[in-house]
Amino acid sequence: SIISSATVHNMNLTIYLKPLSLYIQLGDHFSSEIKHYSRKLREKAQRNSDQIMLGHRQLALSRYHYQKLTFRQAIACAVKALSHFSSSNDRDDIVDSLSHLAIYEVEKGDLISASGHVKEARAIFDEIHCEYLRPYLLLAEGAVTRAEGDAAAEGILENALATSRKMGTREITWQIQRQLALLFLDSGDIQASAAFYRDSIESIKQITESIPDEGIKMSYLSLPFRKRVFDEIKALRSK
C-alpha cells in the first residue's frame, strides 16, 4: 500500500489525516478530496486545540506544494508545521518537519538554512532514535551534502538507499536514487547518473503497479516532482 504509516497521536483525527496524505500523494485527480479533508482536519483540530494535528496538516500541505515544485509555499507550510510541533514538544515530528524543510531549501538553493535544519534534525534524532524517521532524514542529509559538494554525500546517499529499501519506504527510495543520479551528474559521470535515473524511474513504476486505475496512475506520474525525473533522464540522453 502506498499509504504511508504516519505516526499520529490523536487517533480520531487520523480519519482525516490519512486520506489527506494519500490523496496528496496521488495528485490532482483528487483535488476536491484534498480540499475537503484539509478543511475538515483544520476545523476539528482547531476545535480541539490539537497542535499536533494542526502540524500534521501543515506538513501534508508542505508535501502538496513540494510535489508541485512550488518551494516557497512548501517552506512556508513546513515552518508552520514546525511551529505547531514545537509548541507541544513533539520531537519525532519536529525531526520530520526539519528534514522536509531542509529538502525544500536545497531545492530552492538556500543551502545555509538547509544545512542548519538538517543538523538540528540529526541532533534530535540521535537523542530519540525514532527509527521510522531514518530514511527521510538520511535523504535530507544526502541532498544537503550533495548540494554543498561534500565528498561525504555518496556514502550518506548509499546508506540512505540501503535503509529505505530495507524499510520498504519506496516513495523515499526513488527520491534517494534521483539524488544519486544528480551526484554523478555533478561529477560528470553520465553513465552512473543515467543508471540511477533508470533505477529511480523503475522504483516509481513499481509504485504505480499498486494503483489499479489508469486516471489515478497518470495523476500520480504527472506530479511535477515525479515527472521531472523522466524529463531529466531525457535531457541526459541528449548530452
Image (cartoon, rainbow, N blue to C red):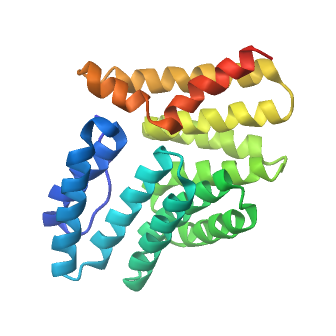
Residue 200 located left or right of residue 41:
right
**Whole-percent x, y for residue 224 in the image:** 50, 36
Residue 193 drawn above or below residue 63? above
**Whole-percent x, y for residue 45 in the image:** 21, 74
Residue 222 located left or right of residue 219:
right
The residue at 26%/50% (across/down) is 34
Q: Residue furthest top?
A: 238
**Whole-percent x, y for residue 208 in the image:** 36, 24
The residue at 82%/36% (across/down) is 186
Image quarter hosting the C terminus: top right
Quadrant in the picture for residue 15 = bottom left
Q: In the depicted view, which residue is nearer to us: 68 or 191?
A: 68
Residue 88 located left or right of residue 170:
left
Residue 118 drawn above or below residue 238? below
Image quarter hosting the N terminus: top left
Res. 223 visible in picture: yes
Quadrant in the picture for residue 167 = top left
The residue at 64%/59% (across/down) is 105
The residue at 42%/70% (across/down) is 81
Res. 129 visible in picture: no
**Whole-percent x, y for residue 172 in the image:** 50, 41
Residue 197 drawn above or below residue 119? above
